[in-house]
Amino acid sequence: QSALTQPRSVSGSPGQSVTISCTGTSSDVGGYNYVSWYQQHPGKAPKLMIYDVSKRPSGVPDRFSGSKSGNTASLTISGLQAEDEADYYCCSYAGSYTVFGGGTKLTVL
Amino acid sequence: EVQLVESGGGLVQPGRSLRLSCAASGFTFDDYAMHWVRQAPGKGLEWVSGISWNSGSIGYADSVKGRFTISRDNAKNSLYLQMNSLRAEDTALYYCAKAPFGELLPYFDYWGQGTLVTVSS
């Protein structure tokens, strides 16, 4: 049960777009369309941003989008805003268990 | 309003046991799967265990398999995590999280504020 691989940090200026990758294997990300993404601000509980690879829960801005190719899932945030600065985690089904990525710190410059 | 309130955390010696509880309200508890997710201080999220709406499907992370037991009481709208043989590496903030579906999928749409478990002598 190895954690999914995410970049430790990404950054972008307000208005720009950033993409966070999440690499797994054919046993998790590549094997199922059950990938989700979470946003976590310091001292707060995580918030579901994307599920089923690319679906947005009600209330999540359409600036957030998800995709998947092979064993790698991606979260793209367009039109970056200051409040998007947070930690982001991917998560995937892996058969009998669930696995998170190590997390990516997004800095809005 | 969905509310998840964890309790039962605290300081415990290595090798001892602790039972966490999560009181749920604001939704039909027995319609949804539930999970425990933990976060060690300054670290990332780690899925611990999940249970489907009717307890028919249960899963554990390898790191806790054989030591932790998840259960739910739908009549009491409550989720539990029995933690035995605790280790220093189990030290973390333990979140109770609700799934948006009844099946055991890796989605968590509501989270509690967490209960802190510290394993130390």
Image (cartoon, rainbow, N blue to C red):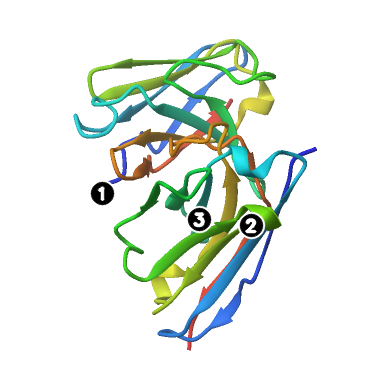
Q: Position of residue A40 (x, y in %)?
A: 59, 39
| Subunit ID for the residue under disc 3 | B
Callouts 2 and 1 in the same chain: no
Q: CA distance from mark 2 to mark 1?
A: 24 Å
Q: Residue at x 70, y 39 (%)?
A: B28
From the viewer's perspective, is the residue at label 3 or at label 1 nearer?
A: 1
Going by the numbered disc 2, the residue's amino acid type is Gly
Mark 2: give few (<14), some (14-19) or many (20+) Cα within 10 Å. many
Residue situated furthest bottom in the rendering? B121
Look at the picture and state if A53 lies above or below B75. above
Q: Position of residue B109 (x, y in %)?
A: 60, 34
Q: Quadrant of residue A7?
A: top left
Q: CA distance from mark 3 to mark 1?
A: 17 Å
| Subunit ID for the residue under disc 2 | B
Q: Quadrant of residue B99?
A: top right
Q: Quadrant of residue A14?
A: top right
Mark 1: give few (<14), some (14-19) or many (20+) Cα within 10 Å. few
Mark 3: give few (<14), some (14-19) or many (20+) Cα within 10 Å. some
Q: Position of residue B73 (x, y in %)?
A: 61, 58
Q: Report which residue position mark 3 lands on.
A: B39
Q: Are marks 3 and 2 in contact (CB under 8 Å)?
A: yes
Q: Report which residue position mark 2 lands on.
A: B114
Q: Which mark is residue A1?
A: 1
Q: Residue at x 38, y 27 (%)?
A: A34
Look at the picture and state if B119 lies above or below A31. below
Going by the numbered disc 1, the residue's amino acid type is Gln
